[in-house]
Image (cartoon, rainbow, N blue to C red):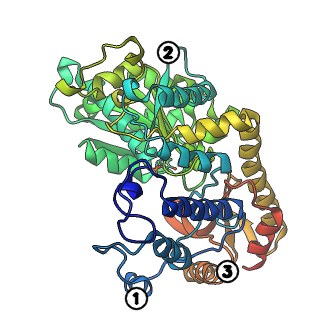
Amino acid sequence: MGFESFAKPYLCGPKNRSMHNIDIDVVEMTLDIAKYVINRITNTSPELGKPMREEDLKALVGETVTEEGIGGEKALQLFKDVLVKATVPIDHPRHLAFVPASPSRAAVMFDLVTSASSIHGAYWMEGAGGIFCENEAMKWLVSLTGLPEGSFGVFTSGGTAANLSAMVTAREHWRRQATNQGKKGLIITSIGAHSSIKAMAQVIDVDVHLVDSEDRLLGGDLSNAINDLSPEERQRLFAVVATGGTTNAGIVDELDGVAKVCKKENLWFHVDAAYGGGALAADSVRHLFNGIEEADSITIDPHKWLFSPYDCGAVIYKEPELAKKAHSQEGSYLDIFKDEGARGFNPADYQIQLTRRVRGLPLWFSLAMHGTAKYKWAVERGIALAKSAARMIEEDPNLELVREPGLSCVLYRRKGWTPDDYKEWTFKNHKDGFALVTPTKWKNGDTYETVSRFCFINPDTTEDDIKAILDSM
Ligand SMILES: *Cc1c(COP(=O)(O)O)cnc(C)c1O
């Protein structure tokens, strides 16, 4: 292997500089790390860590980056004993805040293989075998959407990068029309959309018109919003972003209704299903996504609800050629695809990144190992947990559902609690290493109400976990 054998042995000074001898220290490091990894991924209830102040961490670990190096054993020890405990394991079965995650063991192990294989994932020429695997996984994702033949996508660093890649494609497509050149674009979405939509609109310098409802965006709402635009704004409008599972409440917009309006008005139709996209695999809720097959582009995060380790998002296009026109980078040093085998799919052409990890590989391996039926089961489990939680909430006289669960999100209130009560309860549970369940706000008419929220991803979460959390309120 590379670094250790020519630069810095694991424990001692630089005694063995050969590239080819297997250094005993490297073997030891490999075993130590393998042991840590195996312990970690077989531990289904890891300690629920908490953040610490930087000064306190520094006081505990001291200098770690020094001229001589502190040695791998010491560094790993510090990481295990101190640093990792100041992180919150996102796969803890009672971590139900934000959008948690639950990467499969197969995917985590293959993440190590991905790094070890040193594959450059930008171009087929260098990454063919790895990109082939990514594309096999991508074909399954695309099949879940029901998009027409020819639709395809690429793995990105996450939903933000996927949304950005799609928005750039949409905007460039719109601006290729002579009448739109030099114009500042405008997109419409609802306040239920993820913050990354607004943030990425800033990056590409387009305006955002927000439909002021966190509930399901209907085709009719969209029509009204378009009709309310000034003629100048209507000319700048080029895209609509619907959400396929809002991050806060799991609400899927009326995608078929929105699709119709987009078609009529000649607008790019993007579906941000970063969180909810996994639920396309679940037969029980698939109908909620009807109309997604009309989208021009779709974002899905395998690192959210498809059990991939961070980071892995995906962007899918109905017409990948349009993405290529927007994203393909030119460079004389990139122009060397002479070999037959070197001609193929180049992920760099379809999203914002050039050099990239083949980050779809862990998903591919886990899918290949387990089969897609296992994925269906695991996603259905999250939906079933949300339903169980809703039932328990209804049966508890102190609690009240805010709305029926959306996908695997449950919003509920503890009767009589103030926003501070929710906050204190969250801090106490976290401090005790018991659970991480954070409050959120739900827009009710003109006011925002603080409520409690669950988001289920981890199929190892149990009904007893939910009960214990509810009982602590
Ligand atoms: C999480 C999320 C994003 C952002 O994805 P990242 O992977 O965090 O960049 C975008 N949209 C929605 C709907 C999300 O839930």
Residue at the spot of label 3 = 416
Q: Which of 260 and 84 lies nearest the eye of the viewer? A: 84
Q: Amino acid at mark 2?
A: Gly
Q: Residue furthest top?
A: 340
- Image quarter of residue 456: bottom right
Residue drawn at x 37%, y 65% as measured from the top left: 15
Q: In terms of secondary structure, where does tag 1 sit?
A: helix
Instruction: Specify which label sits upstream in the sequence, 1 or 3.
Output: 1
Q: Please state if 331 lies on the left or on the right of 192 as rendered.
A: left
* Picture layout, residue 308 above or below residue 87: above
Where residue 139 appears, as percent x and y from the top left, is 58, 25
Residue sitting at x 25%, y 35%: 185
Nearest to N terminus: mark 2 or mark 1: 1
Circle 2 sits on which residue?
A: 150
Residue 137 lies, with reference to residue 77, above or below; the image says above
Query: Which corner quadrant holds the C terminus?
Result: bottom right
Check whether the beta carbons of the residues at disc 3 and disc 2 lie within 8 A of each other: no
Judging by the rendered image, the residue that carries numbered circle 1 is 59
Q: Residues within 10 Å of mark 1 (few under 14, many from 20)?
A: few
Q: Nearer the viewer, residue 101 or 104?
A: 104
